[in-house]
Amino acid sequence: MSRIGVFLCYCGSNIAGTVDVEAVAEMARTLPGVVYVETNKYTCSDPGQEGVKNAIIEKGIDRVVVGPCSPRMHEPTWRKLLADTPVNPYMLEVANLREQCSWVHKDKAIATEKAKDLVKMAVAKVARLSPLHSTEIPVHKKALVIGGGIAGMQTALDIADAGFKVTIVERETSLGGKMVMLDKTFPTMDCSACICTPKMSEVGNHPNITVKSYSEVESVSGYIGNFEVTIREKAKYIDYTKCTGCGACETKCPSKVINEFEQGMSKRTAIYKMFPQAVPSKPVIDAEHCRMLQEGKCGVCAKVCPTGAINYQDEDKLTTETYGAIVFATGYKLIDWKPLYPEYGGGKYPDVITGLQFERLVNASGPTEGHILRPSDNKEPKSVVIIKCVGSRDPNKGKAYCSRACCMYSAKHAHQYLDKVPDGRCYVFYMDVRTPGKGYDEFYMNTVHDGAQYLRGRVSKIYKEGDKLICKGEDTLTSQQVTVAADMVVLETAMVPADGIDELAAKFTVGRDADGWLVEAHAKLRPVETNTAGIYLAGTAQGPKDIPDSVCQAGAAASKVIGLLNKDKLESNPQISRVNEALCQGDGACANICPYGAISIVEKQFRENSRKVTRPVAQVNPGLCQGCGACTVTCRAGAMDLMGYTNESIMREVDALCQW
Amino acid sequence: MMKYANFPGCSANTTGKSFTISTNYVAKKIGCEFVDIPDWNCCGTSAAALTSPELAVALPARSLAIAEQKLPGLDVVAACAGCYKSLRTSLVYARKSAENLEQVRELIDMPYEATTDVISLLEAFSAPEAREAIAAKVVKKLRCLKVACYYGCAMVRPVEVCDFDDPEDPQSMDELMALIGAEPVDWAFKTECCGAAQQMAVPKEARPMIERIFQNAWANGADCIVTSCPLCMLNLDMREAEINKARIAAGKEPFDIPCYYFTELIGLAFGGQASELGIDIHFHPAEQLLQKRAQDAIELEKAEAAARAEEERRQAELAERIARKKAEKAAKEAAAAKEGADVGKEDAR
Amino acid sequence: MPVVENNANAIPEDWEPKIIAFCCHWCTYTGADLAGLNRMNYPANVRVLRIPCSGRMNPQYVIEALNKGCDGVLVCGCHPGDCHYVTGNYYARRRMMIFKRLLEYEGLEPGRFQVKWISGAEAGKFRDTVMKAVEDVRALGPINLTREIPYFELPAMPDDDEEAFNAVPEEVFPEEVNA
Amino acid sequence: MLLSKQNLMPLLNSLASDVDVFVPTTIDGVKKFARLADGVEPDFDMINTTMPPKDLLFPQTQKMYHFDVDKNGSYHIHEYDESREQIVFGIRPCDMRSIVCLDEVFLTKGFVDEFYANAREKLLTVSIGCTQAAETCFCTSMGVDPIYAPNADVMLQDTGDAYKVTAQTPKGEAAVSAWSEFLSDGDAEPVNCDVTLKVSMEGVVDKLEGMYDSPIWENLSIKCLNCGTCTYVCPTCHCFDISQENRKKDGVRFRCWDSCMFSEYTAMAGGHNPRPEKLERERNRFMHKLNFFERRYGMSLCVGCGRCVEKCPVALDITRLIDDIGSYEVAPASAE
Amino acid sequence: MSAQEIIRARAKELLESGEIATFIGWEAGRFTNQTTPLVITDAADAGKLVFNEYCANTLAKYVTDVLARGKVGLVVRGCDSRAIVRLINDKVIKREDVYLVGVGCPGMKDRKTDEPLKKCTECRHNNPLVFDEMAGENAEKAVPEDRFAEVKEVEAMTAAERTRYFESIYAKCIRCYACRDVCPCCTCRECFVDQRRENWVGKQNNVAENRFYGLTRVMHIGDRCIECGECERVCPMDLPLMKLNRKVIQDMNDLFGEFESGLVISAEPSVLTTYELTDREEFM
């Protein structure tokens, strides 16, 4: 027979003010199973807690009901208190006598009556609870970072500096991501290579970091602390141990391929290094365009290679490792504006370029060695029009959201153009200028003072007349139509999630919002975590942002990972679902409904009526189950029950309220 | 067999007279029959829309209802872009929901199912069957005539209503012009508005809209502008002189860019005379260009013929030289063979 | 067994509606606490039963509540999209829509079974929902489903003195009980 | 003595004035015995009711006693006795025979169930012989005379336009003497009632002894759904379960019908179930009907009323089982 | 060859060839036009199989009992095939466990009154939807026009009338659980009524407990019910149970789109165990 102790609290006058605590105590003594009732002025105070502890030990109480404030406030306190007593911390029920009783009802008699009911419910429930113990989950002290851009690299560095092993999986042939493509970075105008390449080499040489370039995640299974990830290292056809990165092969390779890194404004060879400062600074053979691999002719690079590092028979390598935590730093790409904006020529006019193409033009290692020459005829454009929010803030044609960073980098582009073409004229068509960071607005003001002509309005049409690009727009401040004859137009296009993010996220059961960005656990309070425990986000994978914000998030994600990997084992939430295998039909309705994928259907052997039977039953993974209970209702047979809120305890709680 | 219910519109026999004449000419030639909708009424264009939305829907709906009963199964063709826009807008409104259809029925107080479709004349003539017929009937290709195809805005926008060709860069008229041998020019103002009614309302502000169109066409090397809407024709053709006067005053060079209906040029290609097609009653003199280009075409043909002749001659000469060399070689071999034979004989002796 | 037409809708004057509210821990329970913090005032006829998520809400609890003595049932959860467990309230929404129609089909007045999405910040909405529920149920009177509560007309106990029955027993110490 | 049919209703109304008279009738489409009251039309032409009359003696849910714990932990128990004077008018001979079985179970061999006993004493049984039998009736094969129930208090036999009334027990005589104003003396031959369905019970009981493992049970039980219909409509099924509903400090213990067809009937703590499959449960039911009861009380527990044959959703038929048992050769009991 | 002869012949062949271990069909009962389910294991008994207009029982649920012996052959009409699909979709059996002999169903008749059974007048798919072979041709049968006529009838009553109506139903119920045991959707290893520890529903038979059982069963099978009408047919008290099931089906039809369960073998979760973001919002 259970020995229930009821500890009611005055909470000073908060409860006692409108609830006759003694009368409730009297009623409590008459409840079945209750052996000891005590009232206390401040139960949560140290003397109060001591009193409770002694009473429990003295009276041999094995279940506790506390009648204080809301469980959201002090449930952890009572749990810690019970941890020092022989009573299991989960043999506890809290009756909310303050926030939902004394504070909200004026009439003392009615409030007392309600308090009695609440205590009755709590006693009925605690009588049916069973002791719960959290299980331990091992934590593998290794982290996986997907994506080698600035966010991925910063995360990896922070984790590695904390002494944990990190693997970076980068899809491209080198680290650097989008940042390394840029020329200068706002607001300080330091050259992007100068601050990005040192980080890349730091990552490349860090003892705790293994870089897997030209690789992708093949498959993943497992849960927090124990992610089994298979990584496919695509064939590079070059033996990196032998290759010294001398680049002889690149000079001799006959086939010409559009250079994605240079945004299609120049050509590269089939065997190529993305850019001079690439890390790993060794080339890769692009199988699709290599004549040797496609038609079996050529083989020049093998002949020329001083160390014989070329190996045409190379294959993809699959490696599987276990990681404790995973960070998504998969970055972004620019929206493909051509099909969306035929009015800007839809790609017909080569001189209508994107922001990244402009970055390559103005970049010293770019196709034009830093001289701003327009792609059509390599002439220096004397008048440039920059159009902002192309695809952003445009629900009809593009994306509804603002891509955050373009206001700053369009001001930067204008500044760079006016800097490099002193006699040039630069027009910027904008809707709003949003420059909220430190030193941001001052940067924008400098650009305006440099002579950039900011016209508030959208460009409705661009057409070619002669060798000029006529931009028809409006200036809403003077409410006049404006037509600018430009030599070159730069479209600051919207940021959208990187290619292939859908399949990747699906593999990890990470949610994606309507626009395809990875969904954080809570927009304000948990921006770098996801709903899947052990998986974190950093950088533009979670949404459009600029480099400073990405680096901040990288640090945050790293700190979360470090916090997780510091633990040798994880305490799992004990209030999780439990399967009664005798009742389980194995139809998997619970597995479908579980938002955390915590339930799996496994074949198990049972002895039934002296016969051995193997049949499918559900199995709950304590690491993933968050205790929402959706599976308990889906399971018609009632095989699935949620510990802490069992069917029986809720039923009796309902009965207790209805005078049963 | 191409048969359509025709919605003439108010401009058919007035400002758009030559459009109707040339259309009938072409239709007769390619065996396409247009049956006028009996007792059709004005489509209301922008005026009705300004007065009340119900009127803008009801006016066109009445004609469509009559077409539905009297000419069942025939699509309605509206030559003028203005009529086409109004009819389409009313049709799309009625088809949107049962309530709308019910409301329209009440307005026009006639049975109406909104089943007959509405297409523009350009769409009718772009149908594959029509294009084959046109190609077959072409007698005289309008060579070296550079045309700027001007669709105007009502023909292609808004997409939800018109749903015909590409709203930004339509090609159907360009293809027809290429079919009859003309050279369509790639220019940027295909679908730029000509100012329509604003030319009457606010002439001072609206005139530059027309000038821009001429300017872009001229800049891209077009000889003339081809259109399929009487209102655009009116604004371009009739007001070119006025714009030229203003340009001369401003010290700019006047334009000499005549405007045609696309059916007029097709008629020409069928061998029709300018007078038969109504080209003679344009505001801006339109015939000299045609004659000049006809001359150019003839010289071009002559030049081409000459070039072809030249080419044949060269080929013949080349063939002949090869033949001669081959003959010499044969002769040399024969000679060599003979000597061999003599040598053989000497050995034999 | 004849259908007992008990407590026909004559509302006894001292009758107070008894309503149970199944509130999800993360949103509505927080909202209720917030109502308390702001010292809002609402009738005391509603007792809150805490469940982790509205997805945990099993229709069988509602039937048990209506069968065993409640005059009204309130089920509250997070707004769709805010659920702490991501999809809990989406499932609950479908299930409750169907179940509410089924109960009303069987004659239960709509006011007796209400479902509301109340977020952690909507203290005011929680108070209004409670007040509206109490008003609705009070207007409807005691639930007129045949229930088993009165079937056990407790026979008069021979020594049935009420206040003796409720008198407070002295402490029962473990040693005594086992002795 | 004779009771003319015209006097039947007046007799019933007079009886009903002071005692509950239960007559066969149809309520809401269900044929059962219900208390005569306005709005309840007795229907004596009905061959038999779907719900058996055992409900009067052994209701589906019966409150046994109320308990409560008072302040100093002592228990008070108060028995319910809801039995009251009842007359069941129009009970068929087969149902009367089932009451004999129930009496055996509830009153004999030293175990007297006082709830049943109270009800039984206060019950006056007025049986009416059958005039026609349903296709599923096979009472004659089970030793029941369709027009004569030996243990009924008063026996009415249909003689065309009147009933031949014979009192058979002291209680019956007392009752009949009270009906004198409705009766008229004279005698008439009761109409006979032939029962089409016949099975031979000969040797069935002994054969069943050796048929524990015979394949008959396999083929029979396969089609059974294991629902409780047959046991709840059977007049002789008497199994019940005891449970209680408790409130704070008091509660009521009640008993309610239970069916050996439910797996939960024999479910034990720890999950073991001595009769886990349909086969065992089916075998147990028929063995109890045709063998166990015979061994213990010397009479078959099946009265041939045919209700289970009529109402079984899958038409599982005890008469065919009896035929199969008849034609089944028991393998010679092996040596060991 | 009539359907019955084809069934007999095929059953015999299948059993002899060992392709199936048991065959389920109907056999004649003792009384005129009475049929009862028959499960045979050796080919000799194939002769007993019958198929006529009085085969009222659905056979699908017997598959689970005889599955241990091996592949099961059975005759499937429209409702049986939907029941088999239901069992497969609920992962109780696998498609390869059963060999389905399809037969067009002319609509079964009541053996005593000779009128078509209520469930057959309301049947919308009388021909098998899933089968391995067909014994004879499909049968023509008019599909009833208003599937929810009964439900609309009850919905037209006032709330008080409906309360009394359903309370009279729950008063008549004797809790024999025939409706649960015949239903292809009810395949739990231990039904909630037997779970004494949770004590969902008391064992006593009164309106409140019967209502708990009735309502819970509808909510458990509502989104998978194949509308075979067997629960109504087997109920000894003739309770109109389909009025409850069809109400839930009608609501799902209106709220979540065209709903007809058991037509196609699929791994789709049932309607109440999934959701759409665009579901109607009534509780804001």
Image: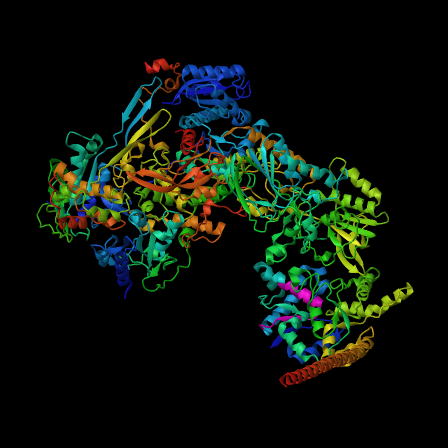
Q: Which residues are magenta?
A: B72-91
Indicate whether A556 appears above or below A274.
above
Residue D123 in view, yes or no = yes
Looking at the image, which residue sits at the far front? Answer: B349
> In the shown orientation, is residue B256 left or right of residue B69?
right
Residue B75 part of the magenta segment: yes
Where does residue E158 sit, x and y in percent of width and height?
Answer: 43, 46
Choose top left, top right, bottom left or bottom right for residue D119.
Answer: top left
> In the shown orientation, is residue B240 left or right of residue A599?
right
> In the shown orientation, is residue B234 left or right of residue A17?
right
Where does residue E58 sit, x and y in percent of width and height?
Answer: 31, 53
Please name whichever residue, E104 or A328, is drawn nearer the observer in this view of the structure: A328
Total marks drawn?
0
Please name whichever residue, A197 or C10, is drawn nearer the observer in this view of the structure: A197
Residue A20 in view, yes or no = no
Please name whichever residue, B74 or B208, is drawn nearer the observer in this view of the structure: B208
Colour treatment of the image: rainbow
> Which residue shows up at 60% across the image and 74% down it?
B71
Residue E183 part of the magenta segment: no
Q: Quadrant of the N terminus of chain B?
A: bottom right
Choose top left, top right, bottom left or bottom right for residue A466.
Answer: bottom right
Indicate whether D9 appears above or below B285.
above
Where does residue E137 sit, x and y in percent of width and height?
Answer: 34, 64
Q: Quadrant of the C terminus of chain B?
A: bottom right
Where does residue B333 sit, x and y in percent of width and height?
Answer: 68, 81
> In the shown orientation, is residue E25 left or right of residue A106?
left
